[in-house]
Every structure is written in C-alpha cells, then in structure tokens.
Amino acid sequence: MDDNKDGAASLSMLLRLMGHDLRTAHDGLDALEAAATFRPDVVLLDIGLPKLNGYEVASRIREQAWGERMILIAQTGGPGRDNAGQRKRGSTSTWSSRWTLLP
C-alpha cells in the first residue's frame, strides 16, 4: 500500500517474481478495502497515504477480528512524515525511523 505508484509497481513485481500473491492500493481507503477483501498475511503500509494515513488504516484493520493477527509493516518516505502522536495511537510497538512491524 503506497501512494508512490512507481515504487509500489517495482516492489509488486519483485514480490510476484518471488511467488507471492498480492494486491496494491494507492490511498488509505483503497488499502483498507484491499485488506478487508484479500485478507493478506502481511501488509506493507505507507504511513503517508492520502485519504486515510497509514496510522488510521492500521488502527481500522486492528479493530476488525480478521485484522487482529495480520502482520503490518509500516514504511515511510523519509523524515517529516512521521508523527509521534499518531504513531502512539496506531500501535504500542517500538518504531524505527524507516521500517516498523506493528503488533
């Protein structure tokens, strides 16, 4: 789930070559819908998504029974896109500046 369409396409191609079945979305609302219908084991989730940011998507996924055990990996394009308050509301895990595994 990434609003950078080129980045999402490149990563998707690589993961498909590795044999993974996946879906992509480029905004938070589409990401939430994709997670609800596809029910992936793992979600790579951009923090800076438009419409709903990654923190909100993660929180809404966690509210659903089907999303309680889903592995969420947060990613961000760089400094300035991370907000500590939103991060705390979205997860109680330890965050790094680049990659994070949400509980």
Image (spheres, rainbow, N blue to C red):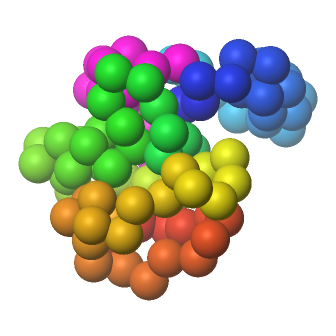
Q: Farthest residue in the bottom direction?
A: 94
Left or right for 29, reference 8 = left
Q: Nearer the viewer, residue 46 or 81?
A: 81
Left or right for 12, reference 30 = right
- Tell whether position 83 is magenta: no
Question: Which quarter of the figure is the N terminus placed in?
Answer: top right
Tell me what residue is drawn at x 80 percent, y 19 percent. 6
Image coordinates for residue 75, horizontal then vertical, percent: 60, 52
Image coordinates for residue 11, horizontal then vertical, percent: 79, 33
Q: Nearer the viewer, residue 23 or 48?
A: 48
Tell me what residue is drawn at x 37 percent, y 37 percent. 53
Q: Nearer the viewer, residue 9 or 49?
A: 49
**Taken as a whole, is the magenta stretch helix, strand or loop?**
helix
Above or below, 51 against 59 in this view is above
Image coordinates for residue 35, horizontal then vertical, percent: 36, 30
Left or right for 56, reference 100 = left
Report the span colored magenta: 26-43
Does any portion of residue 43 appear in the rendered image?
no
Tell me what residue is drawn at x 27 percent, y 67 percent. 85
Tell me what residue is drawn at x 38 percent, y 16 percent. 30
